[in-house]
Image (tube, rainbow, N blue to C red):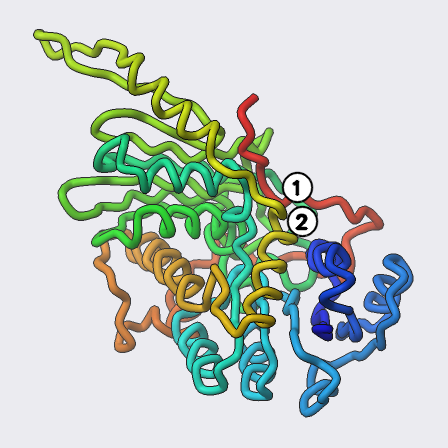
Amino acid sequence: MIRVAIIGTGNISAAHINAYLAFPERCKIVALVDIYPEKAQAKKEQFGLDADVYDSHKLLLGSEDIDLVSICTPPFSHAEIAVDFLNDSRHVIVEKPMAASLEECDRMNAAAAKRGTVFSVIAQNRFLNPIMNLKHVLDSGKIGRVLHAQVDSFWWRGHCYYDLWWRGLWSKEGGGCTLNHAVHHIDMLGWMMGLPNKVSALLSNAAHDNAEIEDISIAALQYEKGAVAQVTSSVIHHGEEQQLIFQGENARISAPWKVHASTSLENGFPKKNEELEQELNDLYSTLPQLTHQAHEGQIENVLTAIETGGAPFITGESGRMTIELITAIYKAGFQQKTVELPITKSDPYYTVQGIMENAPHFYEKTNSVINLGSSQEITLGGSYSSK
């Protein structure tokens, strides 16, 4: 039985709690931690957990009663908490974003490697059937080399969203929608295409004058052999319509699933390639379905890694790759010029301090509250199912 501690009991912790409760024969939540212990107590009562409540994660260090820790705290604290538990030889799952800087990512990964523990960064959208199957179709090579990718990470958040005490601040959130919302889609793009060679970006705050950070960014990415991608990160888009589109040499595929394929007429204009479209649709429809999806799927994968001594599907190195691309977008947007990857250790943007020294303050935070009303409803991204 794997004994679990949840660190941070805000809204996202419910996704972790529900996922662990789906495997009662394999794990048990034994501890809840929050700097506001009344919030942890409320979660304990809400889910009927037989768990102890603490107001500091440090109270669990050295305990032999914890095997696995889920870190669900604000981004600025991820690295400290993760390194503490990894150095304590505990397995760790950390919510997205992995950290606010590459330096923090490297410290976390070094601690995991030193102790040989399982370390995974939440990227639950990879554990959705439409996303997993899109990856399989890409890997089949049937659409040819990817020439262009379009990533629409469209979210909507009201003005009061940034009144929460840790949101809207570079020093606490580590960034705006690019780091904290589009991280899902940037992770999926990196998984499917790898890192680009060059990045250009535009950042803005169009609708939230109570936040220092951006509420929209548009990035242009350049890959080898001329392939390009565009990534729009936003919390100002009504409807929260999210999609990933890949234009290959032979066909276009996407999540939500849609296929178009063309061949060339003698004059260069397109002719529908019905045979390839049917082949791609047949391949997609016959791919296996995941037994567990989203947070439940990723946590089941981590439990399996712990039980078998294997590696999780999404590792700390994978989480670092996502942060490197986001860091490049910020660097390009802050400097208003094209930047090259990789981001080296000598780069000012490698550290939190360097990012803070260069980050623009679009506005200053004007309000700070401990909790945002009574509603616990949050959105975790699109289902990517075809309408």
Q: Which residue is drawn at 65% across and 53% down?
A: 296
- Residue to which mark 1 is pinned: 158
- Residue to which mark 2 is pinned: 161
Whole-percent x and y of residue 173?
56, 62
Sort mark 1 into few (<14), some (14-19) or many (20+) by Cα contacts within 10 Å. Answer: few
- Residue 196 is left or right of residue 109, and the answer is left
Q: Which of 383 and 296 is in front in this view?
A: 296
User: Disc 2 vs disc 1: Cβ atoms closer than 8 Å?
Assistant: yes
Whole-percent x and y of residue 5?
72, 73
Inspect the image, locate mark 2, and give the three-letter code of the amino acid beneath it. Answer: Tyr
Secondary structure, mark 2, is helix
Q: Which of 22 and 123 is in front in this view?
A: 22
Picture quadrant where residue 40 is located: bottom right
- Residue 110 is left or right of residue 43, and the answer is left
Q: How far apart are marks 2 and 1 (CA)?
A: 5 Å
- Say above or below: 146 vs 263: below
- Say above or below: 326 vs 270: below
